Image (cartoon, coloured by chain):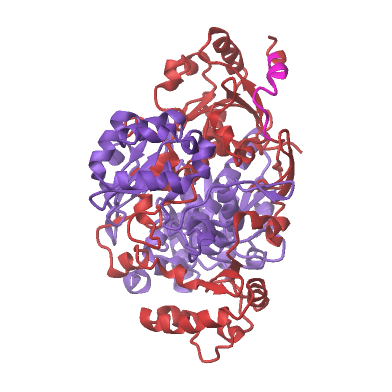
Chain colours: A red, B purple
Amino acid sequence: MPGALDGVRILDLSWGIAGPLGVLLLAEQGADVIKVEPPGGDPFRAYDGYRVWNRSRRSLTVDLKSDTGGEVFERLLATADVVVESFRPDVMEQLGFGYDTVHAAHPRVVYLSCPAYPDGHRYAQRPGYDALVQASSGQMWEQPGWRPGPVFLHMPMPSMGAFFLISTGVLTALIAREATGRGQHVTTSLFAGAMLYTTQIWQHVEKATAQFHELMGKSYPPGIHQTMIFECADGWVHASIMSGLTPTKSQDAILGLADAPDPFAFMALPPDEREQFNARRREKFKEWKRDDIVAAFQEHNHAIEAIITPDEQFAHPQLIANQMVQTVVDPIVGETTQIGTPLHMFGTPTAIQGPQPTPGQHNEEIMKELGL
Amino acid sequence: MTLALEGVRLLDFGQYLAGPFGPMILGDLGAEVIKIEPVTGDGMRLASKPFFGCQRGKRDIALNVKDPRGLAIALELVGTADVVHHNMTAGVATKLGIDYAACKQVKPDIVYCNTWAYGLEGPLARFGGLDPLYQASSGLEHESAAVHEGNTPLYYRFGMCDASNAMLSVVAVLGALYHRKRTGEGQEVWTSLFDGGAIFTSDAHLVGGTPAPRPHLDKDLMGMSATYRLYRTQDEEWICIAAVTDDEFVALCTALGVPEILDDVRFRTSPARREHRRQLESVLEPRFRTKTATFWTRTLDDAGVPNEVPVDTLGGEAPLFDADNVELGLVARYTHPVFGDMRQFGELIGFSETPGRIAGPPPLVGQDTRAVLRELGHEDPEIDALIADGVCYEPDDHYSERFVN
């Protein structure tokens, strides 16, 4: 069965995280993605994890600054539906492939730009590494840690928001093209990606109640969910009060704390009383092995997860059940285990289209297709 | 100009966050989103802030779908819709009579999306769950706190697994709508919080069964390497640097007044700098301590070293009043009949030909009940009876005591 984007050709000029991963969600819906990168390859290839974000596409190396390279790209544009680029504003113009030029010659092309900052913003020409956008957007200050002050987010959160905006923007413009017959300039940024994840905590409300500010406010130690993290004999778990199921035995009874309040009454207690109970719970958790308490809680319909390392995910039975543990034979390092495609579509199945290409791996094939 | 998703009608049967956030984003892109809300209100209304964060711009019909008359109205609506979207746990939609099979019967080309907690099948498929569980299962909580350094795990307060599930559903629904435009076929799609967490650590992978290298945070949560991290400055402020290339490293050492370390073989290449991270940091840390953050950002800018002074958002409101953010449409502003002027992030994607829009504030419970029922052809006496019988609800004199927290 063909994917939803069968027959859609995407030229991916992006580097970093957001562009390659945003394109990945389109590639694995069946789009024909050609990674257009400079001779020698996209500099981010040095990072190991890139072989996941860069998979499911072909690679063409071309020097866009040279005349012959420009001609090849021009030929490629004539076959394309989508262009994705993530340079600073003006870089594509300097190469002679800015939106206006491309749109004039190829009006059906959807052209997506994802610089670090929006064009027109006072930050627009500032360097755009993910960590710097964490700093400038305020995300570092929003996250409490184990010391006062801003915290470096291990998760590259601006990029991890922007990639969704890229996939969303391209698909929306492709849908619009069905009605208008025309492509357009779609713009987003890492900065916008950072804002995507502020929706539950960044709001101004003129007539807000006191509870409004307290509930999701930044606090030390960090907020309400942090109190549900427990150390076991051999690791950590995150318990939760909501599983959507009816418990067959209370968490505290499983732990051996018969006199504890029910979970909702517990959450309503004043912080110091909550802490008193939690101190007792913490002692009980330490008597359990991590995987044993997870199994015991789940058996009685309580939501809980072991706090694992990212590499341990591949053994998680639910990740396996979701067909999200996949073997990919990489052209350089050989057999790898990677996550699958998190889009589950019955009518237009998604799938990994292949490993990351080596730089220029498909030069000959693509040049032949172009008649060059 | 037409909206990109002009003419797309989406029914949002979801509650809480991971369901409703996706329809909100699709609404921003031009879809008409109708929230089908229980007459007792979305469970998330108890906590206004996260609720508001996922609901703007929707129309709202309050309907008891468990009542046969309510179900009939829901299915009438499905007959007029392009997308059905929700985050009910396993079996609930089937029990209510609004699963894919039921919806497909009244609308053969419907796009049907369920945003699960875990997934369609598998050992935990029957469970619901909240965002932090998936920060645990994906490894985020382990990495966020540098647990390998002996720290307690730390959850991120952004709720981004909720948002990730929702955004996956947006991408899946848009893919399905594109396919429907080209073929006329609808389909069923699903996403999950669990997978939404996993994509955030998707650079993690095994090579021949062994974990590939990934960078980790230090014990003080300052950063990933000596040249990609926060430093403390003389005035007890902070600066984040990203001296990633060799040229940027040379510029950094020169600007900090320690050009002599460029001759040190331990710091000559990027891999060498990673290997001798602590040694390099012990040179750089005291240098940053000699001057203010403002001094360093100006100096590093002049030297071509990427850097930023972290912005304090003052409780998350400062960015919503930032002149550039407002000017560029990154801030949405609207007025709520009860809560007054509101701000939230705005349009995060720009479209040169088919722009999006923010259709309005988060809805009141049942604010469009009567209008939607009239559009379906129901007349006022019948609507009044449905409301009197508790099958539907529209705001009345007791609204505030029932729904405002």
Q: Let me know if residue A29 is in the magenta part.
A: no
- Is residue B5 visible in the rendered structure shown here? no
| Count of labels in the image | 0
Q: Could you tell me which quadrant the N terminus of chain B lies in?
A: top left
**Is B385 above or below relative to B350?**
below
Q: Residue at x 23, y 41 (%)?
A: B294
Q: Residue at x 48, y 17 (%)?
A: A97
Where does the image place residue A83, in percent across and percent down from the top left? 54, 25
Quarter of the image where one finds residue B364: bottom left
Please name whichever residue, B87 or A216, is drawn nearer the observer in this view of the structure: A216
**Is A32 above or below relative to B196?**
above
Please name whichever residue, A99 or B133, is drawn nearer the observer in this view of the structure: B133
Q: Is residue A27 left or right of residue A116?
A: right
Please name whichever residue, B396 or B282, is drawn nearer the observer in this view of the structure: B282
Where does the image place residue B203, in percent across and percent down from the top left? 60, 45
Q: Residue at x 52, y 38 (%)?
A: B272
Q: Is residue B233 left or right of residue B390?
A: left
Where does the image place residue B75, in percent across and percent down from the top left? 60, 58
Q: Could you tell me which quadrant the C terminus of chain B lies in?
A: bottom left
Please report the bounds of the magenta region as a residue range: A356-367
Please name whichever residue, A254 or B285, is drawn nearer the observer in this view of the structure: B285
Q: Residue at x 49, y 72 (%)?
A: A228
**Is A15 above or below relative to A277?**
above
Where does the image place residue A312, in percent across and percent down from the top left? 65, 58
**Is B82 above or below relative to B303?**
below
- Is residue B365 visible in the rendered structure shown here? yes
Quarter of the image where one finds residue A55: top right
Q: Let me know if residue A357 is in the magenta part.
A: yes
